[in-house]
Amino acid sequence: MADTQLPASLRATLPGRYYTDPTIFAAEQALVLESGWFCAVLAADIPAAGDFETVQVGRESVIVARGRTGAVHAYLNVCRHRGARLCTEEKGSVRRSFQCPYHAWTYGLDGTLIAAPNIASMPDIDRREYGLNRVAVQEWLGYVWVCLADEPPSFDETVVADVTTRLGSPDAIVGYDVAGLKLGRRITYDVAANWKQIVENFMECYHCGTIHPELTEVLPEFADGLAAQYFVGHGAAFGEDVAGFTVDGSAGHERIPGVAAEQDRRYYAITVRPQVFVNLVPDHVVFHRMFPLTAARTLVVCDWLYLPEVVDSGADLDRSVELFHRVNQQDFDACERCQVSMDSRSYARGGVLVPSEHHIGEFHDWVRERVG
């Protein structure tokens, strides 16, 4: 369905096969998920030397671990000897090293090969060369981002640029001090939908008046169908009678000190391609990480982050968590409703985007540029 065949008000979407075809998903794993920066781990989840998490990045399992000096390292979860999976646990802690359970090849926290049976009789082995395959690492906003590419793209020109483009300034997010916030709640959602369905849903609000009654009560302008992301630098204003970003509009928690006056009582949504959503409100940040597992299944990990003193005080977080938890459930149900129709002949050539959704077309172009 070419754009030339459509009324000016409409733009074509991706064809349905982009959401179901295993060949396209394999291309996305290689050319999108494994080629750019991928948000893997909340840095505070691996606070001490030896703490680690394993995460799925495209086709690869990656170990992210805290080293003895405090630095974070990442490497492919594959023993260099015979290819055995090194760690099967999702998270844990080791004292000084990782040891392969097959032949006991042992690696330091920086990935260097430090021991193996009979290695003394093999003096020609370069222990660093035969260490674990390292992955590029960057820490930002309190999270560990990894890149599997041999030559990673510029972090500033990709990840930071997405935030800058949305907010209009690289400094607009600084006052929220996201890295200084503390995890108050985490919910993981197993969504039976393609990862692009979830990105597209998050980017638009044409659906908000239909499926998000709690959200439109707090952010009345969303009932008009224009998402905050439609406008550069715009934050959706709280309703006049709304005291906080909570499920019932009641007061939230202490405002993050660095939030500027013009940012107060506003909600900002940011998409960081390919798999992060950042939601900024005056007293907390909601941070989504997506882990695409198959063409029709995506794991979404959602963190609610607050000032440390709010979390440490034992304050009741339920009302603020419940608002976005309901939004997530409503959104993911909608994505699953779409996913089951992607192989229908009715959607073989795709659907259409109305004017308030036209910016999603830029995301589609971004995907096409990478996978064809």
Image (tube, rainbow, N blue to C red):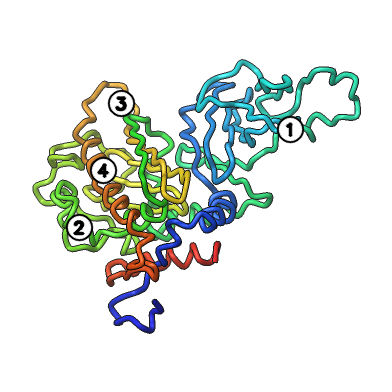
Counting other residues with Cα less than 10 Å from the Cα at mark 3, is it few (<14), some (14-19), or many (20 or more)? Answer: some
Furthest residue to the front? 345
Q: Amino acid at mark 1?
A: Arg
For the residues labelled 1 and 2, the Cα–Cα distance comes to 52 Å
- N-terminal label among 2 and 3: 2
The residue beneath circle 2 is 222
Name the spot of residue 338 as percent of width and height, x first: 31, 56
The three-letter code of the residue at mark 4 reads Gln
Label 4, label 1: how far apart the Cα atoms are = 42 Å
The residue pinned by badge 1 equals: 80
How many C-alpha atoms fall within 10 Å of the one at disc 2: few (<14), some, or many (≥20)? many
Q: Is residue 99 visible?
A: no
In three-dimensional space, the C-alpha distance between marks 1 and 3, rounded to whole angstroms, equals 42 Å
- Residue at disc 2, secondary structure: helix
Report the front residue among 13 and 73.
13
| Image depth: mark 1 or mark 3 in front | 1
Earlier along the polypeptide chain: callout 4 or callout 1? Answer: 1
Is the N terminus in the top left, top right, bottom left or bottom right quadrant? Answer: bottom left
Q: Residue at x 17, y 56 (%)?
A: 210
The residue at which mark 3 appears reads as 311
